[in-house]
Image (cartoon, rainbow, N blue to C red):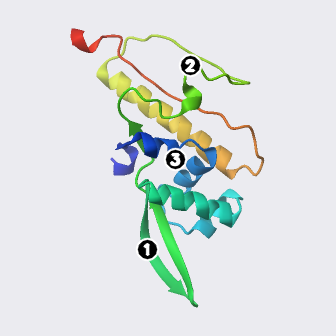
Amino acid sequence: MNPKQNSIPISVEQSKLLGSAQRIKIIGAIADTAKTAKQVADELGQSPGSTHYHIQKLHDGGLIDLVETRTTGGIVEKYYMSKAKWFDLDGDHLSDPVLADGFESSNSTKINLRLSLTPEQRDELTAEFKSLMEKWVTLTSSSKDEGEEFAIGFKLISAKKKSDA
């Protein structure tokens, strides 16, 4: 299995860095291949200055790595790569404040249900949601249209309390 398919734990401060659709698009663009800020900006149809700013924030926050530096014709090219495709925030904190119950959104959809799942089915369901989210990051990253920003969360929780386990 590709190690980047696994989640890595992050702090509350790091999760705040991921509260931007543009930064999620950047993570997606450099998840499998190291790229320069200019390459990412061109791929996403964004301004190089804005993309460089967000890459610096992600790098300073420890979510992406500087993996190579090349000097070509006197120009220093820095290649960045994401540490993972998925990031986990442990504990009771929400990774995105927009997903909090008290957030007054102009447009939202909530879907809730309960299922009985085997451990294998739980893993398969989680993998399918990750795949669906990756598909939509890719679709929206390649679109030149600026749409309304939405927050999406997937939370699969056992109905069994810790004290019952």
| Local crowd size for mark 3, using a 10 Å CA cut-off: few (<14), some (14–19), many (≥20) | some
Q: Are marks 2 and 3 in contact (CB under 8 Å)?
A: no
Could you tell me which residue is drawn at 53 percent across and 67 percent down? Answer: 35
Kindly identify which residue carries mark 1.
68
How far is mark 2 from mark 3, CA to CA? 21 Å
The reply to whether residue 79 is in sight is yes
Instruction: Compute the Cα span from label 2 to label 1.
Output: 42 Å
In screen coordinates, is 130 left or right of 148? left
* Secondary element at image label 2: loop
Residue 38, x across and y down, in percent: 63, 69
Residue type (three-letter) at the residue carrying disc 1: Glu
Query: Could you tell which of marks 2 and 1 lies nearer the N-terminus?
Result: 1
Residue at the bottom extreme? Answer: 73
Q: Quadrant of residue 6?
A: top left
- The numbered dot on residue 101 is 2
Pointers 2 and 1 in contact (C-beta within 8 Å): no
The answer to whether residue 26 is left or right of residue 109 is left
Task: Residue 17: give its label.
Answer: 3
Rendering quarter of residue 91: top left
Question: Count the marks: how many?
Answer: 3
Which residue is depicted at the point 38% across and 11% down?
Answer: 116
Where is 49 relative to 141, above or below? Answer: below
Task: Name the residue: 63% across, 49% down.
Answer: 22
- Report the mark closest to the observer, 3 or 1: 3
What amino acid is at disc 3?
Answer: Leu
Mark 1 crowdedness (10 Å alpha carbons): few <14, some 14-19, many ≥20: few
What amino acid type is highlighted by mark number 2?
Answer: Asp
Taking 129 as reference, is 79 above or below it? below
Q: Provide residue 83's location: percent of width, then percent of height.
A: 40, 54
Label 3: state its secondary structure. helix
Question: Looking at the image, which residue is at 78% across and 47% down?
Answer: 145
Picture quarter with the C terminus: top left
